[in-house]
Amino acid sequence: MKIQKAAPCAEALGLRTAPYTGCTLACALAGCSARSLRYHYVSWSEPGQRLPRFMALGYVNDQPFIHYDSQGDTQRAEPRAPWVWEMEKDDGRFLERETQRFRNAEVFFRENPAQQSSSGNHTAGLHTWQRRYGCEILHGDHRNRFWHYGYDGQDFLSLDMETLTWTAASVEAQTTKREWEARTKNAEIYKDYLERECFDSLWRHLDYGRPTLLRKEPPVVRVSRRALNDSRDVLVCQAYGFYPRQISAMWIQDGELQLQNTFYRNVTPNVDGTYNLRLAIEIDSKDWDHYQCRVDHASSAQHLVLDWEAPGGERRASAADLKGQEGSKPLRTL
């Protein structure tokens, strides 16, 4: 295991990143994490015994904090994170405002003609109508806002914050685009919320949820190897149990970043709120000792660099193991 101080750019690390420039990877290499507040709504055209007409979820930093189900026992916003109870205790009306927010959205989906079909004509069968909106603070304090609609799982309309017009993702969305642009008040309300209230709410959640949202749990990393045939192997690097979600993992061969023949799986959640990541690379069997997996995560200012070691078959370590080893000399400079 080898450790080095994190640097903001791949060039500063001595990595050769062709065909990509190193600075395009800067945020990933630095272990950047976004702070975000997002809401996801889904409305079904044909609710049933197990399918509500409307459902809403709110997330802070990918952690659910609020839930609403039109067929739930209470038909009210229900907390999904411990800090929400503290907000309600101090505020007294937080859950009532969230409930009203969701009920208003439920009425919108029920009454808006775009729910019937993406072409404006009624079609039989089950259809879904989605809204996703929110705000986020990215690396370097860059702020982003978004307000999107989807229909049957496909992009439908997105609000342009500068022009307050709607961008249609398909020909079928043009009818709804024209109807909505004929009444601009909704777009103005959406923009005002995203630029003011959304960020205020985000900071409030981060303040109340600090022990949960701003915690840092280091990844446990394992490198394994298996043979494909007599001449080809696969090296697998697994990182799991980490928080926050943002993480960078890559294969390095003799100091050079390897993108070709590398296979990634999306970051997946665990039931405890932590995350997992897996990436593999196909290599020549005789070159296995030239490859290392490097992991960068906000839980440590150090790069975690591991290689597979024979004859053990796999090697396991966590970023927590790096404590007290900062003075150790790396075997290879990255």
Image (spheres, grey):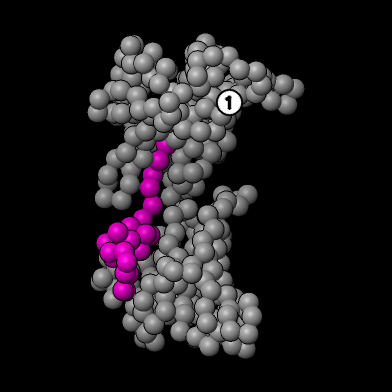
Residue visible at 56% across and 71% down?
A: 236
Can residue 42 be seen? no
Residue visible at 32% across and 69% down?
A: 17
Q: Where in the figure is residue 163, as x and y percent of width and height? A: 25, 25
Does dot 1 land on a helix, a strand or a loop? strand
Residue visible at 41% across and 31% down?
A: 169
Q: Which residue is mark 1?
A: 128
**Quadrant of residue 224 in the image?**
bottom right
224 versus 209 height, above or below: below
Q: Residues within 10 Å of mark 1 (few under 14, many from 20)?
A: many
In the image, is 84 to the left or to the right of 179? right
**Quadrant of residue 43 in the image?**
top right
Tell me where the magenta segment starts and ends, as one range: 15-37
Give the position of the C terminus as an image quadrant.
bottom left
Q: Where in the figure is residue 180, as x and y percent of width and height? A: 37, 15
Q: Where in the figure is residue 230, as x and y percent of width and height? A: 63, 85
Q: Where in the figure is residue 192, as x and y percent of width and height? A: 30, 23
Q: Is residue 284 magenta?
A: no
Q: Amino acid at mark 1?
A: Thr
Farthest-out residue, front:
171
Can residue 153 be seen? yes
Farthest-out residue, right:
49
Q: How many numbered callouts?
A: 1
108 versus 200 height, above or below: above
In front of the other: 304 or 115: 115
In front of the other: 76 or 212: 76
Q: Is residue 31 magenta?
A: yes
Residue visible at 51% across and 33% down?
A: 154
